[in-house]
């Protein structure tokens, strides 16, 4: 019975409770171009913290993330983390170069789980071959098997493919795209796969640098839900106010080489920051008044012998006084107004039977729409539904079928989604503007660049050395060179900080022309546009409202339901192609339900078989005669434990399959 007690102690003893994660950033210092980017910065990342890292472009947010991720060494200070802790880092941009398909690349996230499974097999084989049951090495081998098994389950190894598919769907991939080579997708979609890999690895700390730049509104909503319930800690760099408000519970601001730590989400942090600034200003004014009085006394009685002692006392008081400083929030920001829009006709854009295909892939199907003078229109929908395609067609950048006509005297200003990438990297900031400017506007180039924060020391920089935010500002500056009456902006807020986005929004609100904007930034769109084109299933639906009203009108809890929500009744007069599409979808759903039901039934049968085996083993292990043969009892116990773990896995598979089946049946 001694061997039974030994094995049981490993499998049934209470697990040690893991200590809460605590990453310590201590006295961090980094120099940049002669100045401090950070100076003796210290803070802690606690277990399940949701931290929003904010600050102006160039404040050092990305540098700090890279240091925490271990990708860059600070010049001073240290980052300490518990032994064995893991960090997942998603940069703003990266080149993957993968030759795998989408699902295969996502599955590389489970490298450690596969390694643990290999160890489980290896240790099990060794145990089966050994007979030194009471030796210390045998006990250690059992412990290592137990640790590998626990780690495998902790990493979600039993549901690797199901989890990968679920995350990929949440980030906007269709199942049909799982087998496509990753190299055939754009950089933004490849970044989604990198994000999926980080989420699937389940690191102790997730570091995300501008993750919403690559996502549409629906995927952002899904990511919000994922991060809110994530078991580890999360540190975000984002200029999406709504995203930060929904995810974070703590805000760290980087300003003037220091940090300011607030136990609050972004909007509350802004309020607290203003309150702190007011208190600092009040304390500063009071101290300056006191200093002025002391200095006046010193100056007045400096040369009177009878007051010498009092004068010296006050001079010492001034020397010892700890001066109150008011934080300089670096209020410099782009400031501009769009030139007055030339007059145009009443109808600015008109489309009839507009159709667009890329090869055999249908993107837009027989669109009919009209955009009138003064309309502020937002394009909303999942990536790949045709928002950017229609924007390019309107500005004359794509061939198409059907009619797309501009109205009388329409002059277009276009900001492409990759506008910053289209800039010539070898030209300087000044040359980029000078090459486009004509006439009298050329005399105002330096003023225009100055309003976009390109000072005298920056205008001779080459574009290739500019940050993403600087390139975005330079691309926006080009829109001011020629007066236009139709602005078409495709994701203009990417890489802009909070202040710059607010100023751009205010400038657009004062623009007197017509606006078409493609954006996934809900906070930016709110109150800006009064008409929405919802892109879905190759066509569009028009909503005469802003974003929040659109959500209410559709009775959506959030925009993540935009794709899944179905119209309950088809309108009369629906064309034949729509009926065929609905019939095909219905058949596809029926097939998926049957397939899922089969999966549930199979899982139930497997569970029943395993439970029958467990009952048989219960009887064997309860028989005292079994334990007279130590080797036999050990083998039976190992098999028994294997059956229980297998039952646990099958139950998880059944629960997940049953839940998915119920979800499909609700869609019928």
Image (tube, helix red, strand yellow):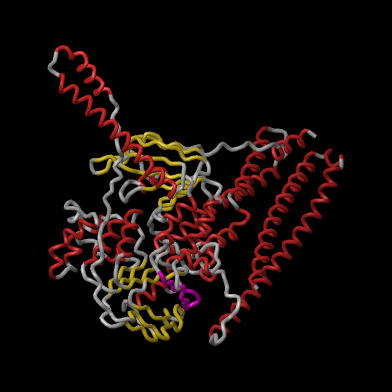
Residue 216 falls inside the magenta stretch? no
Residue 534 falls inside the magenta stretch? yes
> Can residue 549 be seen by looking at this rendering?
yes
> Can residue 103 be seen by looking at this rendering?
no
From the viewer's perspective, is 541 left or right of 518? Answer: right
The majority secondary structure of the magenta stretch comes to strand
Percent x, y for residue 301? 16, 19
Residue at image point 73% right, 46% down: 641
Residue in the foreground of this view, choosing between 633 and 420? 420
- With respect to residue 244, does 352 lie above or below? below
- Can you name the residue that lies furthest to the top here? 306
Magenta segment boundaries in residue numbering: 530-543
Residue at image point 17% right, 58% down: 447
Residue in the foreground of this view, choosing between 141 and 479? 479
Residue 26 lies in what quarter of the image? top left
Q: Quadrant of the C terminus?
A: bottom right
- With respect to residue 383, does 280 lie above or below? above
């Amino acid at each position: 019975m001694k061997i039974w007690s030994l094995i049981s102690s490993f499998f049934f003893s209470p697990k040690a409770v893991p200590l809460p994660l605590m990453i310590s950033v201590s006295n961090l210092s980094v120099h940049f171009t002669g100045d401090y980017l950070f100076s003796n910065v210290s803070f802690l990342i606690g277990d399940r913290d949701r931290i929003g890292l904010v600050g102006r472009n160039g404040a050092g947010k990305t540098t700090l993330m890279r240091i925490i991720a271990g990708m860059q060494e600070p010049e001073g200070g240290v980052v300490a983390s518990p032994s064995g802790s893991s960090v997942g880092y998603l940069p703003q941009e990266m080149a993957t170069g993968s030759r795998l398909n989408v699902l295969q690349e996502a599955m590389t996230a489970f490298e450690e789980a596969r390694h643990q499974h290999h160890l489980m097999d290896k240790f099990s084989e060794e145990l089966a071959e050994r007979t030194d049951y009471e030796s210390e090495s045998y006990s250690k081998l059992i412990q290592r098997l137990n640790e590998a098994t626990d780690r495998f389950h902790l990493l979600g190894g039993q549901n690797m493919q199901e989890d990968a598919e679920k995350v990929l769907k949440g980030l906007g991939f269709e199942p049909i795209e799982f087998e496509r080579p990753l190299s055939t997708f754009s950089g933004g979609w490849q970044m989604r796969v990198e994000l999926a890999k980080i989420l699937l690895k389940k690191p102790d700390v997730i570091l995300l640098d501008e993750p919403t730049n690559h996502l549409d509104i629906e995927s952002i909503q899904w990511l919000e839900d994922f991060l809110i319930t994530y078991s580890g800690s999360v540190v975000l760099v984002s200029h999406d106010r709504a995203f930060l408000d929904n995810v974070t519970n703590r805000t760290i601001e980087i300003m003037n080489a220091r940090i300011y730590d607030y136990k609050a989400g972004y909007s509350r942090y802004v309020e607290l920051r203003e309150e702190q600034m007011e208190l600092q200003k009040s304390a500063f004014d009071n101290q300056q008044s006191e200093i002025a009085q002391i200095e006046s006394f010193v100056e007045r009685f400096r040369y009177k012998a009878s007051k010498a002692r009092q004068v010296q006392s006050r001079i010492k008081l001034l020397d010892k006084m700890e001066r109150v400083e008011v934080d300089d929030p670096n209020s410099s920001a782009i400031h501009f107004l769009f030139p007055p829009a030339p007059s145009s006709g009443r109808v600015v854009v008109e489309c009839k039977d507009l159709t667009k295909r890329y090869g055999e892939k249908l993107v837009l199907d027989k669109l009919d729409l009209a955009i009138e003078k003064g309309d502020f229109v937002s394009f909303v929908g999942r990536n790949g539904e045709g928002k950017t395609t229609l924007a390019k067609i309107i500005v004359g950048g794509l061939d198409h079928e059907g009619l797309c006509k501009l109205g009388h005297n329409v002059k277009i200003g276009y900001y492409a989604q990759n506008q910053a990438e289209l800039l010539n990297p070898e030209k300087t900031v000044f040359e980029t503007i000078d090459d486009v400017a004509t006439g009298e506007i050329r005399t105002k180039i330096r003023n225009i660049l100055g309003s976009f924060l390109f000072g005298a020391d920056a205008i001779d920089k080459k574009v290739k050395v500019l940050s993403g935010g600087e390139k975005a500002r330079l691309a926006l500056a080009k829109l001011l060179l020629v007066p236009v009456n139709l602005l078409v902006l495709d994701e203009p807020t990417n890489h802009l900080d909070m202040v710059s986005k607010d100023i751009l929004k205010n400038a657009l609100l004062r623009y007197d022309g017509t606006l078409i904007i493609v954006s996934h930034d809900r906070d930016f769109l709110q109150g800006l546009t009064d008409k929405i084109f919802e892109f879905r299933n190759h066509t569009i639906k028009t909503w005469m409202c802003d974003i929040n009203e659109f959500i209410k009108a559709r009775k959506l809890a959030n925009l993540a339901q935009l794709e899944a929500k179905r119209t309950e009744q088809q309108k009369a007069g629906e064309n034949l192609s729509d009926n065929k599409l609905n019939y095909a979808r219905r058949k596809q759903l029926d097939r998926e339900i049957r397939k899922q039901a089969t999966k549930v039934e199979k899982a139930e049968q497997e569970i029943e078989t395993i439970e029958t085996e467990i009952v048989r083993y219960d009887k064997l292990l309860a028989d005292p005669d079994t334990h007279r043969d130590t080797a036999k009892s050990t083998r039976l116990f190992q098999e028994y434990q294997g059956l229980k773990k297998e039952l646990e896995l099958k139950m998880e598979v059944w629960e997940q399959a049953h839940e998915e089946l119920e979800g499909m049946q609700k869609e019928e």
